[in-house]
Every structure is written in structure tokens, then in C-alpha cells.
Amino acid sequence: MMRRILLPLALLALLQLTCVAADKVDDAIQAIARAGSQASGSVAAAAAVKTLTEQDLSILPRLLTAMDTPNIVAANWYRQAYETIVERELDKEAPRIPVQQLKAFVLDPSHQGRVRRLAWDLLDRVDPDYRQLTIPSLLGDREFGSDAVEQTMQAALKMLEQDKQSEAIQLFTVAFNESRLNHQILAAANQLEKLNQPVDIIKHMGFLHRWYMLGPFDAPGFSGFEMSFPPEKKVDLKAEYRGKDGSAIRWQVRQSTDRLGQSNLIQAIAPVKEAVGYAYSEFHSPLTQDVELRCGADDNMTVWVNNKKVFSRLQWLNGTRLDRFTSPVQLIKGTNTILVKICQGPQHKNPAVPNNWSMQLRLCDSTGGSVGVKVIHPLPTEVPGPEGNSP
């Protein structure tokens, strides 16, 4: 009789202890979530980390999920607790790492890339063959796609070493189609060209590379970003304007010769400082679609698509690099217009630093892939020659 009574009581006590522990973990995670910049909430977060590190390995999945947050300060606190628990477990003779849960987390693209990589780093320590076996299947993955492309490129090079040209071409083509990083795109394209299989990087990446360009307008100091010039009210490709130093300026057709679509405005417009230039183009979209505008400029830029401002970034001494900024844009089926304003600031205080003036812009899907846009005006037949040459 007594045994029948004690067993349920023991189970009830165990359940209560489990609930108390769960509540402590929840409270600690919430305390860290409130941490912010300037040491805000740091005292409570430090105490919460101590509480979390007293728990066992079972809370690792919860810590990974908690780290999947835009709050970088909180993520760093969670990571401190995570790494303490992991190292303590790995020091044991027979560590009990939750491998299957980690694999599920790593392969879930809804999680942030940095947290997925952290989980995979732990997997490498307990299942070192898993990455090599799994990466090839992740072509197109937002975080691990570049790793998969690299492995595909290496496999293609091995095919070449074995004189298996057709297999190499197939693999290089896959690598090119899935590449989103500039060095991988160029490497895959170069290999395919050597094998007499040329590819179109501009089309593949959705670069806009052919423009009507106008400038330079005078913009003393750092005033250009706030100033407004006639093209912002109306684009008149036949108009003539008064430019920097009082010279007459008109729209000129220019096409980038850069393989990744970057336009050099020093060549295309003029080698000037403290100025503003404009680029205008019309392009075709095969359907009405939501896309990403990915761009960068030196110094800064503002972009209008179909007369609507879709991007503006005030940042001087701002180098151009692939996909530096991203903004959502809706395209209509058929002809769309795009106007870009690119500012040029004063000479850098260090005279040895060149005053570059450039831009790079493309339209793509959320993975960085092509959305089928094509420049229709200006026409290729209007291009006078290499970028910056006079007609």
C-alpha cells in the first residue's frame, strides 16, 4: 500500500523539479533577450548565463534557437552559455552531443547562417565526415551554397585531371549556375571559356550595364546627396544642362566593360571631385514580380524604379562592391525605368587614396539568381565603343 502511494508522489516531485528547471531556463533566456547596446541589461544577462551554464546538454537546441535573433548582443550572451556547456561535455570521456537535432538545425534554411555554421562546427567535432558528404547537396542554399559550389569546382578540376572533359563541363556549368560570389562566378566562367563553353555573366546575375549617363553637376563638398538636379523631376534624354564649371552636358550612352557590370564614372562621365552624375536605363521584365535591387557605389547613390524612390544611402567614402546593399523592388511586366544618382565627394584627406567614382547594380531574386531582366534602352547599337569613349 505504502509503495503504491510513494511511487506517484516520486513521479510528481520529479515533474515539479523538471518544470522548475524549465522555468529557470525560460526566465534566463528572456533576461538575455532584453540585453542591448551600451551594456543595457548586462548584469541580468550575466546572471542568466550563469543559470544556463548550470544546465545539462539538453538545452543546446534551445540555445541555438535563441541565438537565431537579430539582437547581436543577446546572441553573444547565448553563445557564451552554449560554448561553456559544449566544452564541458566534450571534455567527458563519452560526450552525448545531440547529433540528430544538430543536423536538423543545420539543414533548416529558415535559421540564420551564422547560427547554422556554429552548429555545424560542433558537428565537425563529433561527426567529421558529415560535412564532406552533405555539402554537395546544398547547392542553392543561402548560407552553404558557396561551400557547395567550391566542392563542385574541385570535383570538376579532378575530372579535367582525369581527361574527362564532358563531365568537367557539366560540373563547371552547375557551379556557374549556382555561383553568387564574384570570385566563384569568374572562376567558373573562366574554366568554361577555356573549354569553349562561354557563358553570359551579365545575364546570369541580372546586372544592368548599359546606360544613358549625364554629368558632372557641381556639388561642392559633401552637398551632392541633398541636392536635387533636373533628372530627378523629369528624364529628358534630349535636354542640355549646365554642368560643373559651367560646361554644357548632355546624356551620353555608356556600356560597362567590366565582367561584373561595374561602371567607372571617372571614365564614363569625367575625372572630377565634388560632383553628381546620373545613369538612366529602361529594361524589360518578363512578368510582374517582386525582386531584390542589389547595389553599391562610390561614394553614395539614390535609385528610382518606375519613378519611385526605392533606395537611398548617405555614406561618403563608400567603396563599390558586389551586393553591398539590398532593397526590395516590384517590377511590372514589360518595360521598367531606372534612374540612379551617384555622388562624388572631395578628395580623401590622404592624397594617396584615389578618389574613385563608380557604381554596380543588379536585379535578382532572394537567392541572388536571375529574374530575367534585359536592358532594352539604350540599345547595343547605340553604344559608341568602350565605356567612356566619345561617339
Image: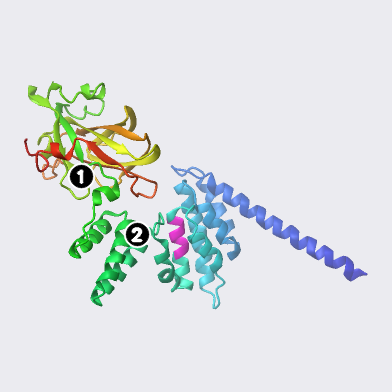
Q: Main secondary structure of the magenta part?
A: helix
| Numbered circle sitting on residue 8 | none
Q: Residues within 10 Å of mark 1 (few under 14, many from 20)?
A: many
Q: Position of residue 275 (x, y in %)?
A: 16, 30
Task: Determine the image quadrant of residue 324.
Answer: top left
Q: Would residue 90 be found to the left or right of residue 202 on screen?
A: right
Region of the chain picked out in magenta, as a range: 114-120
Q: Disc 2 residue type?
A: Ser
> Is 57 placed left or right of 304 in the picture?
right
Q: Is residue 119 magenta?
A: yes
Query: Which is more N-terminal, label 1 or label 2?
Result: 2
Q: CA distance from mark 2 to mark 1?
A: 22 Å
Is residue 157 one of those drawn in magenta?
no
Label count reads 2
Who is closer to the viewer here, 196 or 187? 196
84 left or right of 237 in image:
right
What residue appears at the point 18 percent right and 42 percent down from the top-left corner? 263
At label 1, which amino acid type do we have?
Gln
**Residue under pointer 2:** 146
Disc 2 is placed on an element classified as helix
Residue 347 in sight here? no
Residue 286: x and y in percent read 35, 40
Query: Is 326 placed above or below 167 here?
Result: above
Residue 391 horizontal/vertical position (percent): 6, 35
Please report the residue visible at 44 percent of the width from the left and 43 percent of the height from the top: 37
**Residue 17: x %, y % from top left:** 72, 59
**Secondary structure under the numbered disc 1 in the rendered image:** loop
Q: Residue at x 26, y 74 (%)?
A: 164
Residue 262 got which mark? 1
Q: Nearer the viewer, residue 21 or 172?
A: 172
How packed is label 2: few (under 14 Cα within 10 Å), some, or many (20 or more)? Answer: many
